Image (cartoon, helix red, strand yellow):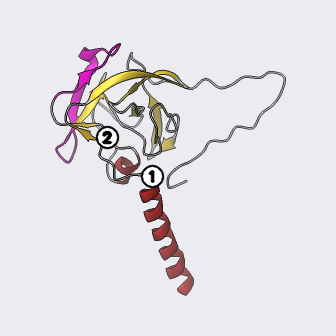
């Protein structure tokens, strides 16, 4: 019994430490959200006004978010209080909003609700690309509103081992 309590306590403290270290408490809401393009390791992708990569969630349907609760802690939705703005090379007619379950307005692009990733700490990072979490994969978006798929590195003369990192539970 003591082991179960100790393991539970350690798990809770680990989760608290992760949330503090990952900066989960930062606000995803912006008075005037601007969606722009930025060059990253994946090529040009949509970013928020701070230059952080914007992602789509493969589980979202019909322009509605399927990410709430702990999902939204790891993948903060891009919330707007007003109308989103298009930066250069972003099609303003593809921008919109969708109402979330809590009543807030989430920015959409080509009807994809937009999210950041809690572990993308600096502008241009793409740590969330291709991650499988909360029931589907996550992808950065192109200016055309399509998932940016990371091309696998091909080297016909050598074999390589590929590892997919996992940054959040339940990995």
| Residue designated by label 1 | 22
Q: Measuring 25% from the left and 31% from the top, which residue is drawn there?
A: 33
Magenta stretch: includes residue 87: yes
As drawn, is 163 to the left or to the right of 48?
right
SS at badge 1? helix
Q: How crowded is mark 1: few (under 14 residues within 10 Å), some or many (20 or more)?
A: some
Q: How crowded is mark 2: few (under 14 residues within 10 Å), some or many (20 or more)?
A: many
Establish if 96 lies above or below 17.
Answer: above
Q: Position of residue 96 (x, y in %)?
A: 23, 25
Mark with earlier residue (1, 2)? 1
Q: Where is residue 27 in the image (x, y as percent from the top left)?
A: 29, 46
Q: Where is residue 134 in the image (x, y as percent from the top left)?
A: 44, 47
Q: What stretch is highlighted in magenta?
A: 83-105
- Res. 82 visible in picture: yes
As drawn, is 164 to the left or to the right of 85?
right
Residue at the bottom extreme, as displayed: 2
| Residue designated by label 2 | 77
Query: Which quarter of the figure has residue 154?
Result: top right
Q: Position of residue 9 (x, y in %)?
A: 48, 76
Indicate which disc residue 6 carries.
Answer: none
Query: Which quarter of the figure has residue 89?
Result: top left
């Amino acid at each position: 019994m003591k082991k179960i309590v100790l393991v539970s306590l350690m798990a809770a403290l680990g989760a608290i430490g992760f949330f503090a270290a990952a900066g989960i408490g930062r606000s995803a809401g912006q008075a005037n959200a601007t969606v722009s393009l930025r060059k990253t390791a994946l090529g040009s992708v949509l970013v928020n006004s701070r230059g952080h990569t914007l992602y789509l969630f493969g589980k979202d349907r019909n322009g509605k978010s399927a990410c709430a609760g702990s999902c939204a802690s790891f993948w903060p939705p891009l919330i707007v209080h007003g109308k989103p703005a298009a930066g250069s090379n972003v099609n303003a007619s593809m921008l919109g909003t969708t109402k979330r379950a809590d009543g807030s307005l989430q920015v959409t692009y080509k009807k994809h609700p937009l999210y950041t990733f809690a572990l993308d700490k600096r502008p241009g990072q793409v740590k969330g690309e291709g991650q499988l979490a909360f029931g589907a994969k996550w992808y950065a978006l192109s200016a055309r509103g399509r998932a940016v798929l990371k091309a696998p590195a091909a080297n016909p003369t050598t074999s390589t081992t590929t590892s997919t990192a996992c940054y959040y539970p339940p990995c």
